[in-house]
Image: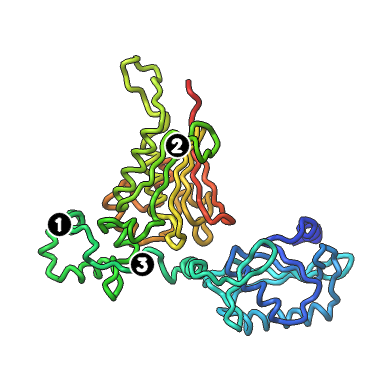
Amino acid sequence: MTAIELLDTIRRGEDSRHQFKRVVKQEMELAEDIVAFSNCDGGQIFVGVADDGTVTGLTTREVADLNKRISNAASQFVRPEPQILTENIETPNGLVVVVSVPSGMAKPYQDKDGNFWVKKGADNRKALAREELQRMFQNSDLIHADATPVANTSENDINLLYFSQIFQMQFGKPLEKAGVPFSRVLSNLDLCAVDGRLNIAGTLLFATEPHLRLPAFIIKAVSFPSDLIDATNYLDSKDITGNIAQMFDEAVRFLRNNMRNFQAGQSVNSVGKPEIPPLVWEELVANALVHRNYFVSAPIRIFIFSNRVEIISPGHLPNSMTVENMKSGISNMRNPILASFVAKILPYRGLGSGIIRSLQAYPDIDFIDDRDGNQFKAVVKRPAQP
């Protein structure tokens, strides 16, 4: 970083990626910032800069003392030990030390007192909510949401006829020829916990009425007459429940039923062509069901407006994934148990190609990774009526 780049960054002020400190007197205050940046998207600490952005600078002696504190903070006050870099930048008012903290690969990080810190704007706050800590463990691939046990469930909640059909299709033999008790079959397929409770994957895939156990994991779909959300004026609305396959079918049907057909040069007796290829809805709905964050207790939302369709999934993209990565076919298996089954019962291949196929069929789609709102949005722009 050059001095010009440094001053330009300082001019923009503190935010969730940049923290100013005039001096650092104790390792613990530095450790709190390191933990917060490591648990979020990373950031930089500028030491030698006042809160108002005034460059106060450090002497060579102060920089030497600071480097010792930085080393001690990272090695003795943060668990696990993070990887950080420091850079000394010369300014007219003295040296500024830039401490760069990457987004950690071993989340969640904590200070020596066991506190988990995260960023909230330019400030730090303790992560106390269970779901928030779970998401950090998930980012480190230590746990997966779809393996989480669901309270008050058992093998008795399984739709046995449907499960038997999928078992026959996957293994080429009837369920009664499995050779082990049904509870062992579920365990071997990672569909239940050791105590017999179904996990989220088992419940969403095969339970008779999964929405009774997991009421937040449904799809809420609404069609509006204009390009704005209206709480009282809408064309169609549906709460879509059932297992994964049923929700997929109902969501795709809702989208198709609320789209226009264009004649596109065909005779008036023709039903016309859909304004947006049906493949787009299949790929985007399957992607939302498989890749949403099941640590977030919220439904998938489908909003149909006069000029666009929004499919909103709880949870932003995982880890270091970006929209550009995703559009190039790079995938991250957030819910591996669900993905392994859905690849056999839905038009989902699990190869990171669904988004590519959507864009090939209909390029006018935007993807928004809303990290502040903790959601991912696919926005399909509707063509004008010819």
- Sequence-first disc among 3 and 1: 3
Give the labeled residue for mark 3: 147
Give the labeled residue for mark 1: 172
- Sequence-first disc among 2 and 1: 1
Question: Which residue sits at x=72%, y=68%?
Answer: 45
Give the labeled residue for mark 2: 223
Q: Amino acid at mark 1?
A: Gly
Dot 3 alpha-carbon crowd within 10 angstroms: few under 14, some 14 to 19, many 20 or more: many
Horizontal and vertical percent for residue 367?
A: 52, 45
Structural distance between the alpha carbons of marks 2 and 3: 33 Å
Horizontal and vertical percent for residue 312?
A: 48, 48
Relative to residue 293, is residue 358 depicted above or below?
above
Horizontally, is 20 left or right of 373 in the view? right
Secondary structure at numbered mark 3: helix
Q: Which residue is most to the left?
A: 177
Question: Which residue sits at x=82%, y=63%?
Answer: 52
Question: Which residue sits at x=45%, y=39%?
Answer: 359
Tell me which corner region of the image, top left, top right, bottom left or bottom right, holds residue 23: bottom right
Count all numbered tags in the image, as a single digit. 3
Q: Marks 3 and 1: which is nearer the front?
A: 3
Horizontally, is 269 left or right of 6 in the view? left
Q: Is residue 363 visible?
A: no
Dot 1 alpha-carbon crowd within 10 angstroms: few under 14, some 14 to 19, many 20 or more: few
Tell me which corner region of the image, top left, top right, bottom left or bottom right, holds residue 275: top left
Relative to residue 341, is residue 154 depicted above or below?
below
Dot 2 alpha-carbon crowd within 10 angstroms: few under 14, some 14 to 19, many 20 or more: many
